[in-house]
Image (tube, helix red, strand yellow):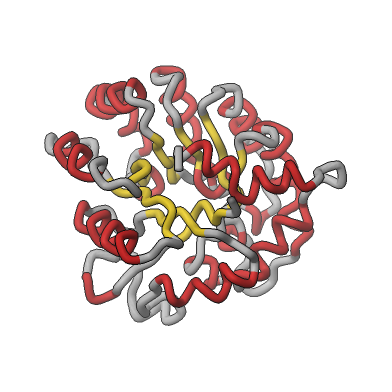
Amino acid sequence: MRIDAHQHYWRIERGDYGWIGPEIPVLYRDYLPSDLQPHMEAHRLDGSIVVQAAPTPEETDFILSLADKHDSIKGVVGFLDLEDDGHGAHFERFVRHPKFVGFRIMIQDMPDAGAILSDTYIEALRSYEKRGVAVDLLVKSDQLDPVIELMKRVPGLRGVIDHIAKPRIAMGTMEPWASQIKQLSAYPNLYCKLSGMVTEADHTDWHAEQFVPYIRHVLDCFGQDRVMFGSDWPVCLLAAGYDEVVDIVKRALPDAWGEAEKEKLFGNNAKVFYRL
């Protein structure tokens, strides 16, 4: 099964996408399954994992409603506010849907990433750890220390780092990101998505070679069984088209990788992680 493990749909009139405004015209429009279908056909993709783009339960309801109508949506990663006492009730409602596969924590948007180490977060994540729930971690490279501490406290968390933790690709910076990624890869239930990289480079002047050391490092750390390809479409359109995003990843793969390894990266690992 070939899967894009990270992309988004949205309908602007819903009104909870606070980060998308008319000042970003390429994103300030609706993006729905019919828009992605030509790209999926071109790259022989069977479907995708749709990840929430707004921090509301209504966003999860919206993408689950799309999943009801479109077979191409293989799984939905929704949103839970773990500081809201009602997150458990929302989860129980979402989990009844056959295509709900987990939720995402938007650490990136937190003024203090250390908030994920509060008793409230740790207690909640330990409960989801026991249930084997998949948790996406949206985090920036300068927020990785709290994530490392989180994994020490919840070591069995079945998690995935989105966008290789957004290293400073435009600046060519590797450390301390590289060392922190190595630490995190020691947790066997933690995966990493090769996604969202092009928007961390210069949007108008990037080169495919810039991404190679970052991609190779992630592959060296996580191995062939715990990495997933994700387009981050349509956010990627800020810097590159769908074809270019795929090409960046393919160019960076080790020469020794054969079809079996590529099939894991482009779908089979997502199938395992999200229990499709």
Residue 165: percent from left, percent from top: 54, 44
Residue placed at 28% from the left, 29% from the top? Answer: 121
Residue placed at 67% from the left, 39% from the top? Answer: 218
Relative to 8, residue 178 above or below: above
Residue 164: percent from left, percent from top: 58, 45
Residue placed at 73% from the left, 42% from the top? Answer: 261
Q: Nearer the viewer, residue 20 or 133?
A: 133
Residue 86: percent from left, percent from top: 13, 38
Instruction: Count numbered badges in the picture.
Output: 0
Residue 240 visible in the current orientation: no
* Quarter occupied by residue 241: bottom right
Picture quarter with the C terminus: top left
Q: Nearer the viewer, residue 126 or 182?
A: 126
* Quarter occupied by residue 227: top right
Q: Is residue 93 left or right of residue 125?
A: left
Relative to 11, residue 194 above or below: above
Residue placed at 32% from the left, 66% from the top? Answer: 69
* Quarter occupied by residue 244: bottom right
Residue 41: percent from left, percent from top: 59, 71
Residue 211 visible in the current orientation: yes
* Outermost residue, right side: 255
Relative to 67, residue 116 above or below: above
Q: Is residue 6 left or right of residue 64?
A: right
Q: Nearer the viewer, residue 34 or 87?
A: 34
